[in-house]
Image (spheres, helix red, strand yellow):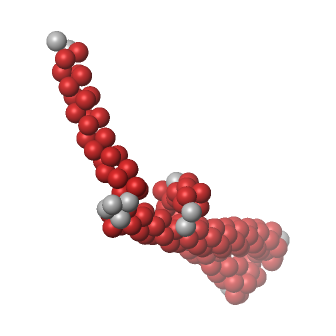
Amino acid sequence: MDNKSLFELRNRLNALPIMKERSAKLHERITDAEKEVKALLTKYEAESMDVEKMKAEKLSIYILKLIGGYEGKLNKETEQMLSAKMEYDKASEKVKELHIQSKEADEKLAVLIREKQLYEDELSKREEKIRNEINSEASRKYRELLAGRAGDKLLCETTSRYSTN
């Protein structure tokens, strides 16, 4: 892998924490939406039972028909049932859409996790190569960098000690 590809890979990996958070939030939203769907289904079933019960009650229907309130009451119950059904259908569609989004986010997350492993493997290979080529120019520069970091730290500590006096 060349340096440019490695750099691009590292930049893509910056999105990994964001994708993990997005995936977790989508899973939370799915759980909440599924609870809502369950509650709306229960509401719809109750409204449906009200309509069925109204149609089945012989004596009360007969009395409502006599006084003229049957059609209005049946229409009201039917409207409530249809409204509950529409809410349920809308919530069900929302859950389906959230599942699609979650699947896409999880797929992107899986790609990033594989790329992270590839990135770490490539860095390990490069470091191993440098260590194995002890007499090479790259190894010498690597040791100088390591020594330079220690020297920079020592210089900073020394400078800070004398600048405070």
Looking at the picture, does residue 87 appear above or below residue 21? below
Q: Quick check: can you spot residue 132?
A: yes
Quarter of the image for residue 65 reads: bottom right
Percent x, y of residue 23: 53, 64
Q: Nearer the viewer, residue 39 or 45?
A: 39
Mark count: 0
Q: Nearer the viewer, residue 131 or 110?
A: 131
At 73% from the left edge and 70% from the top edge, which residue is drawn?
86
Q: Is residue 30 left or right of residue 69?
A: left
At 35% from the left edge and 46% from the top edge, which residue is drawn?
145
Q: Is residue 33 left or right of residue 62?
A: left
Quarter of the picture holding the C terminus: top left
Q: Is residue 52 left or right of residue 23?
A: right
Percent x, y of residue 133: 35, 65
Percent x, y of residue 73: 76, 70
At 35% from the left edge and 53% from the top edge, which residue is drawn?
140
Quarter of the picture holding the N terminus: bottom right
Q: Nearer the viewer, residue 23 or 148?
A: 148
> Residue furthest toward the top?
165
Percent x, y of residue 139: 36, 57
Q: Is residue 50 left or right of residue 165?
A: right
Quarter of the image for residue 164 reads: top left
Q: Quick check: can you spot residue 32?
A: no
Q: Nearer the viewer, residue 94 or 69?
A: 94
At 22% from the left edge and 33% from the top edge, which residue is drawn?
154
Looking at the picture, does residue 28 appear above or below residue 47? above
